[in-house]
Amino acid sequence: MDRSRQFGVNIFVTIHYEESLGIGSSEIFERAIGIGQVVNIQENGLIQVQDLHQSSGQSGLWQRIRSCEATILSHVMIKPSIDFNAMGIEVRFHE
């Protein structure tokens, strides 16, 4: 991942996969495929993320990511936030 000030070591991130909504469509859908943690930010700014949890039904995609398939990796996005439910945290408002 490239340099970004939005990331720090040990923060949790959501791992997304971008895909087209159909042949010939210019619309993109981002599908959350896992939760990760930033484990290192190199001096050159590159960010290393370790996956901690993979969404169910995504094992084939994760295998291709681990195989470093360039066409797949070019569609992987990392966002510096996670869903509360993904971490098992329950938040209640106005009770």
Image: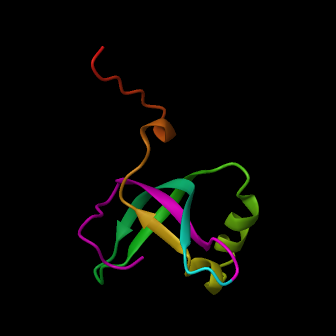
Q: Nearer the viewer, residue 94 or 58?
A: 94
Split into 4 quadrants, where in the image is the C terminus? top left
Q: Position of residue 47 (x, y in %)?
A: 38, 72
> Number of callouts in the render?
0
Q: Is residue 40 left or right of residue 33?
A: left
Q: Position of residue 93 (x, y in %)?
A: 30, 23
Residue pictured at 73% horizontal, 52% vertical: 57
Q: Is residue 53 left or right of residue 48?
A: right
Q: Is residue 45 left or right of residue 49?
A: left
Q: Position of residue 85 (x, y in %)?
A: 48, 36
Residue sticking out furthest to the left: 5
Residue sticking out furthest to the top: 95
Residue sticking out furthest to the front: 25
Give the vertical position of 51 relative to 93 (above or below). below
Q: Position of residue 55 (x, y in %)?
A: 63, 50
Split into 4 quadrants, where in the image is the N terminus? bottom left
Classified by dominant secondary structure, the portion drawn in magenta counts as: loop
Q: Is residue 5 magenta?
A: yes
Q: Which residues are magenta?
A: 1-23
* Image coloring type: rainbow
Q: Is residue 31 magenta?
A: no
Residue pictured at 54% horizontal, 58% vertical: 51
Give the vertical position of 35 relative to 63 (above or below). above
